[in-house]
Image: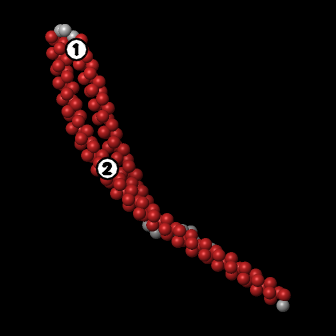
Amino acid sequence: MAKAFKFELHDVLDFRNFEKEEAQNELAKALAVETQINDNLQIIASQFISVKNQIDASSSFEDIAAGNTRKKFLEMQKEELLKQLAQAKLVSEQKRAVLAEAMKKTTALEKLKEKEESVYKAEVDKEENDFIDDLTNSNKRLAGQARQ
């Protein structure tokens, strides 16, 4: 009967799928870095509030001076994390662009495969219908010859 469907660009499609998975993993890593930085910013914000409350509750000059020093240190940490976050967002956007390109390439090949497969199936269906028609016609001929 008919041979099985074989997509000639199957290896290329597999490679494109591999590239897409790699791009997804790289984006996930970049987003994890962003999340970690945001988590650290939240920790600094809560520490800042805690230090502010301690300063407001204190009447000792040493405690107030230490609190202000701690606030300045937290502010410096926050500024550094904001710089890191901006850089991480740039990296994430680059990874998103790479993923989008990989998905576009993969989608194009998948559509081509689907199109070729539908053409193949149509050809197989036609061959099967032709075979059934030939078989039916030959049975009718044989039945007609047997009557004679």
Name the residue that disc number 1 marks: 56
Q: Position of residue 129 (x, y in %)?
A: 65, 75
Q: Position of residue 137 (x, y in %)?
A: 72, 82
Tell me the CA gap for discs 2 and 1.
45 Å
Q: Nearer the viewer, residue 48 or 134?
A: 48
The residue shown at (37%, 47%) is 25
Q: Nearer the viewer, residue 147 or 10?
A: 147
Q: Position of residue 61 (x, y in %)?
A: 15, 10
Q: Position of residue 13 (x, y in %)?
A: 43, 62
User: Along the horizontal axis of the image, is 73 left or right of 139?
Assistant: left
In terms of secondary structure, where does tag 2 sit?
helix
Which mark identifies residue 95? 2
Q: Nearer the viewer, residue 1 or 96?
A: 96
Name which residue type carries label 2: Lys
The image shows residue 125, relative to residue 49, as above or below, that is: below
Quadrant of the snapshot with the N terminus: bottom right
Q: Return the residue found at the far right.
A: 147
Q: How is the image coloured?
A: secondary structure
The residue shown at (27%, 19%) is 50
Mark 2: few, some, or many residues within 10 Å (few <14, many ≥20)? many
